[in-house]
Amino acid sequence: MPSDFDFFDPEFQANVHPHFARMREECPMAHAEEPFDWYAVTREKDVRALLHDWKNWTSELGPGLSRTGGGVLVSVDPPEHTFDRRLVNRAFTPASLLAMEPQITELIDEIIDGFVERGEGDFMEMLAVPVPLIVIAWLLGLDPDLVQQMRPRADAVISADALQQEEMARQLAAQAGEADRSGNTTRGPAEVQYFLEKIAERRAMYAAGEEMPQDTLTALVTAELNGRTLRDDEIVGFMGFLFIAGSATTTQLIGNMVYRLLQNPDQMELAKNYPDLYDTCVEESLRYDSPVNGLFRTAVKDQEFLGVEVPKDTKVLCMFGSANLDPEMWEDPEKFDVTRDYEDLKLHYAFGQGIHYCMGAPLARVEAKVALKLVLERMPNLRLTGEPTEISAPVMHGVETLPVAWDAPAGN
Amino acid sequence: MQKLVIERRLCLKSGQCSYLQPEVFERDEENWPVVAVEHPEGEQVELAQDAIEMCPAQAISLVESDEA
């Protein structure tokens, strides 16, 4: 049986909207056979059904096509997931993330100061890439400069194919575990060593009763729930996951949003004239161009879905980006419209749905909103100067480069 | 007495409340959360407080109510 679609074809990546539409119509339980058999669901009601049914559709073999167990949060189900989520929730409450808005405003202002006189450049490299990386560095208590140097490694993990990811995850787990047992932190990739050093620093501070920074790393190091604390390799798992989940995704959100506004001048005018619409600009971008095309669930047993017999351990991709364009849920879904009703719009699937709903969503929303506000204020007459290129990681969707120009402030 | 309220305009259907505290919250067929115990008492108040703390949408609250 040939595959119903080719998720890894750059042509598919560049034209997800028509491909999603065809799949919703013709093959709602689409079959793929590279590099092994898997499926994709693309209709809103089916995506929703799978995401809420974690007892039958597990996350324990990871959210990607690769079968990688032993992770945190996004790679576990209750009760492990409940433990992880309670723990991270303390450092990641919506209120504490929203409270970062002034700090994020200051950061984006500074970043814009650094390039605004140039009058042109790649929007992604100048702004959309550094902002989320620096914010996640703050949260994890890491050095922002070092974190920016780690970006190629994170990108490599995201864009690797399933078999490569399985190998990477195995290596990482083995190295972190070994370092944990031996106390020898000089082995393993540079970022694992760096994370372990940071953890050791914090443990020493904690043991000495020193005052700890109020960030996610402190929450992880000091976490205790029902007498259980986290081992070094578990904390490395959290840090690696939060680093990957929290940076590239928000980069895509910021870039995709600005691109669609540039492509739709009437919508750009609305955004410029009505600051009240910033929130819906962010949500409509998330709906129209979901930064993550979708994430996988795995069948816990041989079971049937949409009339298809799915063998145990088979992966099914819940296509968030397609649920977000399903005409059964959305009126005129192919129209990019920043005046949609916010209450309906916020129920898009860009952050997933159900128990794995993205914990960083409030943070991504604040970063994107502040970026939009400052870009409109400080980069007047923003315009495209060429065609953007599409990101190559299959699970991600959006622009990789975004060449723009604007009216630079007059020199002094 | 206290009344447990979910504000649907804020809800993101994360399902945290109904899976963490099924004694107090249920879900309807469209996966919207539904309050199962409108006026929590005793230990139920603690269960409700836990869900309030864990809700990523800050959509749940306990409000003072005159209803008997």
Image: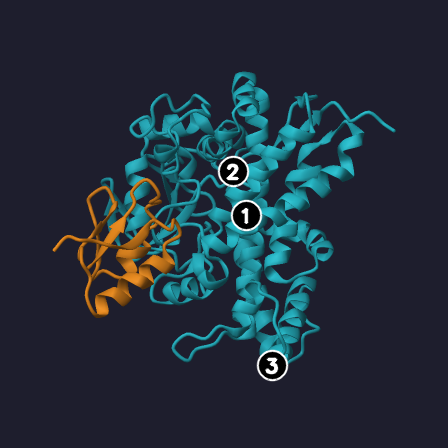
Percent x, y of residue A374? 64, 34
Mark 3 or 1, which is nearer the eye? 3
Which disc is residue A242 wearing? Answer: none
Q: Is residue A195 above or below residue A249?
A: below
Q: Residue at x 39, y 60 (%)?
A: A60
Q: Which numbered disc, 3 or 2, marks the residue closer to the eye?
A: 3
Looking at marks 1 and 2 on the same chain, the residue that comes earlier in the sequence is marked by 2
Question: In the depicted view, which residue is nearer to us: A238 or B24?
Answer: B24
Please state if A94 lies on the left or on the right of B41 as rendered: right
| Residue A17 visible to the viewer | yes
Determine whether A183 is above or below A2 in the image.
below
Q: Classify 10 Å Cα crowding around label 1: few (below 14), some (14-19), many (20 and above).
A: some
Task: Provide the letter of the chain coloured orange.
Answer: B
Q: Which residue is mark 2?
A: A8
Left or right? Give the position of A271 relative to A183: left
Between discs 3 and 2, the one toward the N terminus: 2
- Chain bearing tag 1 is A
Subunit that carries the residue with mark 2: A
Q: Which chain is cyan?
A: A
Q: How many marks?
A: 3
Name the foreground residue: A82 vs B37.
B37
Residue under label 3: A209
